[in-house]
Amino acid sequence: MDVRYLGVDVGTKRIGLALSAPGGIVSPLEVLPAAPTVEDNARAILAVADEYAAGAIVIGLPLNMDGTEGDQAKVSRALAAAIGRASPLPVHLHDERLTSHAADHRLIERELTRKKKKARQDAVAAQILLESFLQAQAE
């Protein structure tokens, strides 16, 4: 895997980011505060992608359990479109169902305060999203 991917878990308050390294290792990166507009969020994400030399971006698509899309999925699609307008980087949308739940389980094992767990949850969710995307690509 030569391309370095930036994983993005979009929330209404925070945006979790994760980064893949050569060999497919994925690490949580950071959490950005969500900006008031989708264009502001796109610029912030692209700045991080540039800083870490990401070659593509993977945005979580929060589908309902029945596979339908709700309001938050529209936000993810709008963000993907804004990034696509602002940059030539490839943008992928990937099903992120249950990533926050899985992130909670990973963080339970660590002895962190509730506040510290909440601060890291979005970046860990982005990590799980990116791991799932890379696994799907390998298959």
Image (spheres, rainbow, N blue to C red):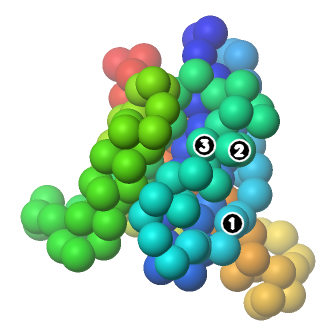
**Residue 109 disc label:** none
Secondary structure found at label 1: strand
- Residue 77, above or below 93: below
The quarter in which the N terminus is drawn is top right
- Residue 4, above or below 70: above
The quarter in which the C terminus is drawn is top left
Q: Looking at the image, can residue 128 be seen?
A: no
Disc 1 + disc 3, Cβ < 8 Å: no
Left or right of residue 68: residue 10? right
Separation of residues labelled 1 and 2 (CA atoms): 10 Å
Residue 33: x %, y % from top left = 66, 73
**Residue 46 disc label:** 3
Disc 1 + disc 2, Cβ < 8 Å: yes
Left or right of residue 90: residue 128? right
Disc 2 + disc 3, Cβ < 8 Å: yes
Secondary structure found at label 3: helix
Which is nearer the N-term, disc 1 or disc 2? 1
Q: Amino acid at mark 3?
A: Leu
Separation of residues labelled 1 and 3 (CA atoms): 12 Å
The crowding category of the residue bearing disc 3, from other C-alpha atoms within 10 Å (few below 14, some 14 to 19, many at least 20), is: many
Task: Return the residue nearer the eye: 9 or 23.
Answer: 9
The crowding category of the residue bearing disc 2, from other C-alpha atoms within 10 Å (few below 14, some 14 to 19, many at least 20), is: some
Q: Which residue is mark 1?
A: 32
Q: Amino acid at mark 2?
A: Val
Q: For the view shown, which residue lies furthest in the bottom direction? A: 114
- Residue at image coords 28%, 54%: 77
Q: Which residue is mark 2?
A: 48
Q: Amino acid at mark 1?
A: Leu
